[in-house]
Amino acid sequence: MQISSATPSTGTASSASAASNINKLQKRMRELTDELRNVAGQDMEAKAKQEKVKLLQAQIQMVQQQIAAIQRQMQQEQMDRAQAQQQAKASQQPRSTPVNKPQSLPGLGESVDTFA
């Protein structure tokens, strides 16, 4: 069993779907890791074992990358939701009118008396 695409290319995956995909990928990674451990005890030529180890390591790395991609997508969706909530909250708050600002005090040059 090999999962080639963990998430759909269009739209965003729901958290439940993403978690389900991560669980499937983690199960696949355990299977590949067990298979990698068992290579040493298999009756094969050394070169064939080496090739099988390389293949299994590449598959494990691919699964790890898929898990990381799903986690990044979930994190981005969470940040997007938080930002949307903040924007919605900000748009619901009534706009306050500025209170009369105190008059600015004159600068030094404006308050100095000059004598001629």
Image: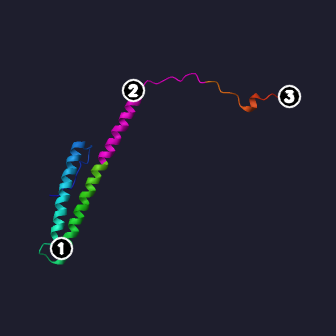
Q: Residues within 10 Å of mark 2 (few under 14, many from 20)?
A: few
- Relative placement, left or right, of 5 versus 100 is left
Based on the displayed image, in which of its 4 quarters is residue 55 positioned?
bottom left
Which numbered circle lies on residue 92?
Answer: 2
Per the image, label 3 sits on a secondary structure element best described as loop
Q: Quadrant of the C terminus?
A: top right
The disc labelled 2 sits on which kind of residue? Answer: Gln
Residue positioned most to the left:
43
- Relative placement, left or right, of 8 versus 44 is right
Most common secondary structure along the magenta stretch: helix
Q: CA distance from mark 1 to mark 3?
A: 102 Å
Per the image, label 2 sits on a secondary structure element best described as helix
- Relative placement, left or right, of 14 versus 90 is left
Pinpoint residue 110: horizontal percent, then vertical percent: 75, 29
Q: Are marks 1 and 3 in contact (CB under 8 Å)?
A: no
Per the image, label 1 sits on a secondary structure element best described as helix
Q: Is residue 84 magenta?
A: yes
* Closer to us: 81 or 7: 81
Q: CA distance from mark 2 to mark 1?
A: 65 Å
Which numbered circle lies on residue 115?
Answer: 3
- Relative placement, left or right, of 114 versus 48 is right
Pinpoint residue 107: horizontal percent, then vertical percent: 71, 31
Q: Quadrant of the N terminus?
A: bottom left
The disc labelled 1 sits on which kind of residue? Answer: Lys
Which numbered circle lies on residue 12?
Answer: none
Q: Is residue 37 placed above or below 13 in the rendered structure?
A: below
x 29%, y 52%: residue: 69
The magenta-colored residue range is 73-101
Give the residue at mark 1.
49
Q: Are marks 2 and 1 in contact (CB under 8 Å)?
A: no
x 13%, y 75%: residue: 44
